Structures are given as C-alpha cells and as structure tokens.
Image (spheres, rainbow, N blue to C red):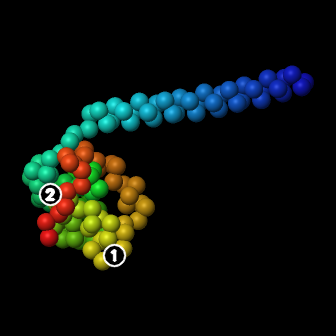
Amino acid sequence: MKQFMFGCFAAFWASVMSIWAYAVLAAGAIESTASAAEAVVTAAELSRHSAADDCWMAIDGVVYDVSEYIPEHPAPASVMMPWCGREASEAYHTKGYGRPHSPAADAQLPRYRVGTLAGGRVPSPP
C-alpha cells in the first residue's frame, strides 16, 4: 500500500511539474513571436490616427488602437478625443485631475495593442 501511495504521489508531482514547464515554455514562445511580429509605429504614423473612428494613442511607449473602446468608455468621447493620434501617458495616468485609471482599465489595454512607439515615449505637445 505504501508503494502504491508513493507511486501516486510521485506521478502527481511529475504531472504538476510537466504542466508548469509546458506553461513556462509556451508563454515564452508566444511572447517572443508577438515581439518579433509587433509593429513599430512612428510619431508621424501615430498622428494619422486621430479621428473617433480611427483613434490610436501611445501610453508609456506602447501604441493602442482604442477606436472600438471609445463608445464603451465610462466618460464621454470628448474626454478621449483630444488624445487620439498622440502620446497620452500623462492623460492615462492622471485622467487630467491626478487620479490613475483602475487595474481593470490596465487589464483591458493589451486587447487594443498595435505595437510600440518608435523612440519610446515621446512628449506630447501642450
């Protein structure tokens, strides 16, 4: 009976370790594939997407196409529109009055990711 229980114990932990190793390796492969295929967006390209139905903004060096999200945003579209086609890190982090967006908002961003901003974070004009 002890041998049977030890065999079950060993099989369980071998399975757990195999699943964990697969998850780590698969995540690394997906991440490297996404990074290799990700677009690098110039400031000029970003500025061409400044309409409500074609709204891209850069936040912390990452470019997002938030066109589909504008109607779903809790605040009116007029809050987001001035940042379309621009670097919007400060606006995102402060909402214009010193309060950051929620973790739920942060979790939604990857869904809208287009690429990275060439040269990283570029200051917005005043």
Q: Which residue is mark 2?
A: 85
Q: Nearer the viewer, mark 2 or mark 1?
A: 1
Give the SS element for disc 1.
Answer: loop
Q: Is residue 54 visible?
A: no
Residues packed near mark 2 inside 10 Å, few (<14), some (14 to 19) or many (20 plus): many
User: Which quadrant of the figure contains the C terminus?
Assistant: bottom left
Task: Give the percent coordinates (x, y) of residue 67.
Answer: 21, 55
Nearer-N-terminus badge (2/1): 2
- CA distance separating discs 2 and 1: 22 Å
Task: Give the percent coordinates (x, y) of residue 106.
Answer: 38, 58
Give the SS element for disc 2.
Answer: loop
Residues packed near mark 1 inside 10 Å, few (<14), some (14 to 19) or many (20 plus): few
Task: Give the percent coordinates (x, y) of residue 16.
Answer: 65, 32
Q: Residue 47 appears in which quarter of the rendering?
A: bottom left
Could you tell whether 10 is left or right of 65 in the image? right
User: Which quadrant of the figure contains the N terminus?
Assistant: top right
- Residue at the location (17% across, 63% down)? 124
- Residue at the location (75% across, 26% down)? 10
Residue situated furthest bottom in the rendering:
97
Amino acid type at mark 2:
Gly
Could you tell whether 108 is left or right of 27 in the image? left
* Placement of 95 over or under 33, stated as above or below: below
Task: Give the percent coordinates (x, y) of residue 30.
Answer: 39, 33
Q: Which residue is mark 1?
A: 98
